Amino acid sequence: MSESIYIPKTANREEIYKEILPQIIALTEGEPDITANLANISAILKEALQFFWVGFYLVKNNELVLGPFQGTLACTRIAKGRGVCGTAWEQKKTMLVEDVNAFPGHIACSSLSQSEIVVPILKNGEVVAVLDVDSDKKNDFSAIDRFYLENLCQYVSTLF
Ligand code: SME
């Protein structure tokens, strides 16, 4: 297993996504342990894209439970339909929230969080986890983030 990844020195997120996705696949496809893989994927996304908070919540006993992440302390359990994560789970679709303060029911794990994108990870049509990315800037996520993070999550679903 490679112990380091190549991160291009650019502020262009699309270039970074294009560079890291094949490396994420190479790093994780031979490793059967889901916790190990989600932990390394969180670490790579944090290091490469400098996200404020990035991590996974896993569906366990009909709740989202905090999984591997990088960032500050986070809430551990989220009910279906609650907050941005619970809404992405319930609706089985990506939630891109430009201003979390304007999102009814947003769960503020950190008062610094200003915008957020949550992508559901589906296996056989059911959500098994969500990828949650938070920014400390308003309006920090675009269709580019949505496209590449959805691609990533399609791959991540094969790891479950
Ligand atoms: N803000 C999320 C909760 C998770 S933390 O941001 C890490 C939500 O509203 O679902």
Image: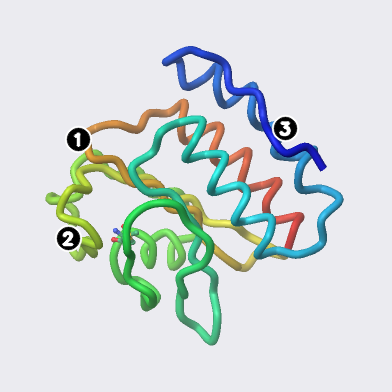
Point out residue 146 in the picture as x, y percentages from the top left corner. Answer: 47, 36
- Please tell me whether mark 2 or mark 1 is closer to you in this view: 1
Please tell me which residue is depicted at 21% across the width and 57% down the height of the picture: 110
Mark 2 Cβ and ligand 1 under 8 Å apart: no
Q: Which residue is mark 1?
A: 138
- Can you say whether 8 is above or below 151 in the image? above
Image side of residue 1 versus residue 150, left or right: right
Pick the quarter of the image with the N terminus. top right
Q: Amino acid at mark 1?
A: Lys
Mark 2 or 3, nearer chain start? 3
Is there a contact, CB below 8 Å, between mark 3 and mark 1?
no
Mark 1 secondary-structure assignment: loop
Which dot marks residue 104? 2
- Evaluate if marks 2 and 3 touch, with contact meaning CB atoms under 8 Å apart: no
Of labels 2 and 3, the one closer to you:
3
Q: Which residue type carries mark 2?
A: Pro
SS for callout 2? loop
Which residue is the site of mark 3? 23
Which tag is nearer the camera, tag 3 or tag 1? 3
* Residue at (53, 61) in percent of width and height: 68
Left or right relative to 95: residue 7? right
**Distance from Cα at disc 3 to Cα at disc 1:** 29 Å
Q: Residues within 10 Å of mark 2 (few under 14, many from 20)?
A: few
Q: Residue furthest bottom?
A: 61
Relative side of 125 to 138, left or right: right
Vertical comparison of 93 with 9: above or below: below
